[in-house]
Amino acid sequence: MKPEMTQDELKTLVGQAALQYVTPGSIVGVGTGSTVNKFIDALATMKGDILGAVSSSVASTERLRALGIKVFDATEVDELAVYIDGADEIDHAGNMIKGGGAALTREKIVAAQSRQFICIADESKLVTTLGAFPVPVEVIPMAAKRIARQFAAMGGVAQLRMKAGAPLVTDNGQHILDVTGLKIADPLGFESQVNQWPGVVTVGVFAFQKASVCLLGTAGGVKMLAF
Ligand code: 5RP
């Protein structure tokens, strides 16, 4: 293994390693992001062996289709064996922060209909406590300011995510708040609490839908963490 592997090369490594979790004849749950793009590229090499994928975003759907992989609607499939996705942070128990690519809601939905969540990430994503990465929260626009005040009361600072000078609009037509200043010592408690706030569509802490396995790209190769 080259010690000087780039983050991009580590993403390729784990994207390819995730193929071992794909069973021939199955439909695969597919996440979103630059690491997942490497997985999608690898998945294309076995597209003749799988039925297709359920996708978590418009971007992933487009990439899957461009590579000739059939995309099923989530409603067409009862249960998926595996969901493969990246993370912005993952802790040593498999809890994650996700949503850096604004796809957190559909990611959580597809993860929830999958028996196993296989997280693929480079080693920079492994943390002791979640919260250094801003927590993405998808919100109904009319509730954004009040939700920001609720985070302020917890010691967080919520910022509306922008794109090209306007609020970013998600695949679901909603907005994203990115919340800094939080140390999430109790991911399950945090996710439960924020989920109750009116106007929150999805909080980007994945504790109920945590990873079962993480394939971590390190300078020494792919390390497998099981939770
Ligand atoms: C998208 C996500 C991604 O999985 C997360 O942002 C990691 O992305 P990348 O693989 O590009 O680092 O949650 O909503």
Image: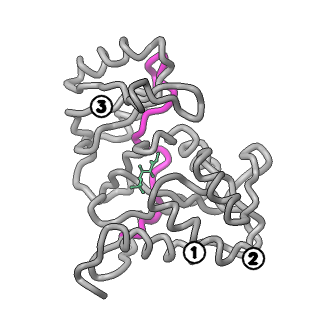
Instruction: Please state the horizontal and vertical placement of residue 169, each as a whole percent of the image.
Output: 51, 29
Q: Colour scheme used in the picture?
A: one colour
- Name the amino acid type tagged 3: Val
| Distance of label 3 from label 1 (alpha carbons) | 33 Å
* Residue 156, above or below 95: above
The N terminus sits in image quarter? bottom left
Determine the residue positioned at 30% across, 58% down.
Answer: 125
- Name the amino acid type tagged 1: Leu
Q: Which residues are magenta?
A: 195-216
Q: Secondary structure at mark 2?
A: helix
Along the horizontal axis of the image, is 90 left or right of 33?
left
- Name the amino acid type tagged 2: Asp
Of the image marks 3 and 2, the number of the one nearer the N terminus: 2
Q: Secondary structure at mark 3?
A: strand
Along the horizontal axis of the image, is 105 left or right of 147?
right
Q: Is mark 1 within 8 Å of ligand 1?
A: no
Q: Which residue is mark 1?
A: 19
Foreground of the two, 184 or 22: 22
Q: Is mark 2 within 8 Å of ligand 1?
A: no
Q: Which residue is mark 3?
A: 179
Instruction: Please state the horizontal and vertical placement of residue 123, each as a whole percent of the image.
Output: 29, 66
Determine the residue positioned at 67% across, 65% down.
Answer: 67
The answer to whether the residue labelled 3 contacts the one labelled 1, judged by CB atoms less than 8 Å apart, is: no
Determine the residue positioned at 45% across, 62% down.
Answer: 35
Of the image marks 3 and 1, the number of the one nearer the N terminus: 1
* Residue 13, above or below 82: below
Instruction: Please state the horizontal and vertical placement of residue 151, each as a whole percent of the image.
Output: 29, 22
Q: Which residue is mark 2?
A: 49
Determine the residue positioned at 49% across, 32% down.
Answer: 202
> Was residue 197 drawn as part of the magenta stretch in this picture?
yes
